[in-house]
Image: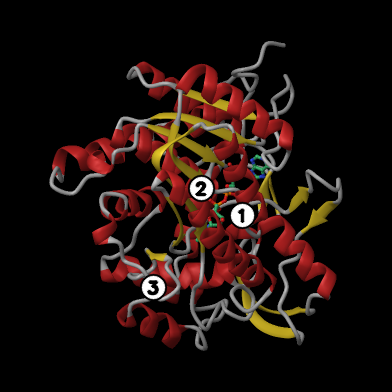
Amino acid sequence: MIVNPRIRGFICTTAHPTGCQAAVNEQINYVKGELQHNPENTPAGAGIKNVLVLGCSGGYGLASRVVAAFGCGANSLGVSFEKAPTTKKTASAGWYNNIAFETAAQSEGLYAKTLDGDAFSDAMRARVVQTIQAEMGSIDLVVYSLASPVRQHPKTGVLHRSAIKPLGEALDIKSVNVDRGEVVEVSLEPATPQETADTVAVMGGEDWELWMDALLDAQVLAPGCRTMAFTYIGTQLTWPIYWEGTLGQAKLDLDRASLAISEKLAVLGGSARVAVLKAIVSQASSAIPVVPLYVALLFKVMKEQGNHENIISHIYRLFATQLQSEANLRLDADGRIRMDNVELSDEVQQAVLDRWPRVTTENLAELGDLAGYREDFLKIFGFGLADVDYAIDVDPTLGRDL
Ligand code: NAD
């Protein structure tokens, strides 16, 4: 089959098996290059031997797994929810990413296994516990990187759907139609209290707590075990739709959960932290109105200033600087690890703020980096990689016996 991108709004319904493999290998090669060329600043001494990554198949979760494995030499168990391929349809990108990651890690003698299914379910928690007991022993780092629009609650069976909306009042705000390259005004209705509660149920901290409770109860966490979940705070440009909206409420709940989990991990001498990461292009972030326009301006500014970070370089910096010793943590007043310091620097933000009111469809290419945004978006699905020949027939059923 010849696989081409088929984009519907903010998702691409196809994924390229060889392209996904090349994208994963690009991340692995980045890590290996850093270890070689910058040996005084690596995550190798972070003491991470066995990692569990929830949401391992894309975005920040995949990058964390790559850095843990290839930067720290860690064995890894991953969990993600994938669409399997058929003879006529490609799988989700994460399906191919997981295969590519496992193949690369195993070829270097690292244990790497991925469980495919709903991470919000108790059944998946039981599978993970069994796998750790049978094959890994114990875990010293749990990365919680799930991003989902829905969650079926494991106790009540209720299907919660998140809503990405402002709170209080309707919001008229600039955004971009990425497909057409048009700067547009969008009008977003405020969330109802039920929509806000549902968003907290999906993206808040309860599920992270359930995971850590299950792992603690099963005694599969190593002494000193750490856990991290990821958040975004951003700036005044995105606050109305993110931090001050439904998603912000969910992320505040993640902060609450972080404290609760830390208390429970104290018996092991362990800790939980929320890490504030920079804005990047991911399946999850492309679904948030306003964010793609902000990201396009941000990328242009950061690339011009020479301080741009992509997913893998950002996570590498997180592991290399924030997981080595408690003494080096860059924490804010709420105990979060701040990795968004470069994005939020005055230098960067002044330039983005200056462009925001001026940006139009006509000058978008000059003020923003929509091309870079689109490139990163396509790469999520394995498209646009330099060394991949997209004219060659590929087998979409890779990894599945049909
Ligand atoms: P992503 O969409 O790239 O990845 C999400 C992962 O979750 C995938 O592996 C997916 O398979 C998995 N997943 C979703 N639902 C699942 C389910 N029910 N069961 C099992 N796996 C499931 O997302 P991302 O952008 O990397 O986001 C990860 C975290 O990072 C989120 O908490 C997000 O808020 C945070 N974050 C993202 C950004 C950004 O700009 N993208 C910035 C800061 C923080």
Residue at x 26%, y 49% (from the top left corner): 324
Measuring from the top left, give residue 172's x and y in whole percent: 70, 85
Q: Amino acid at mark 1?
A: Ala
Crowd tier of the residue under label 3, counting other residues whose Cα lies within 10 Å: few below 14, some 14–19, many 20 or above: few
User: Residue 59, which numbered label?
Assistant: 2
Quadrant of the rendered image containing residue 247: bottom right
Crowd tier of the residue under label 2, counting other residues whose Cα lies within 10 Å: few below 14, some 14–19, many 20 or above: many
User: Residue 368, which numbered label?
Assistant: none
The front one of 302 and 129 is 129
Dividing the image into 4 quarters, which one contains the N terminus? top right
Q: Which residue is mark 1?
A: 284
User: Residue 332, which numbered label?
Assistant: 3
In the picture as drawn, the residue positioned furthest to the front comes out as: 267
SS category of the residue bearing label 2: helix
In the shown orientation, is residue 255 left or right of residue 268? Answer: right
Whether the residue under disc 1 has CB within 8 Å of ligand 1: yes
Whether the residue under disc 2 has CB within 8 Å of ligand 1: yes
| C-alpha gap between disc 3 and disc 1 | 25 Å
222 relative to 107, above or below: below
Specify which label sits upstream in the sequence, 3 or 1. 1
In the shown orientation, is residue 132 left or right of residue 126? Answer: left
Measuring from the top left, give residue 376's x and y in whole percent: 48, 52
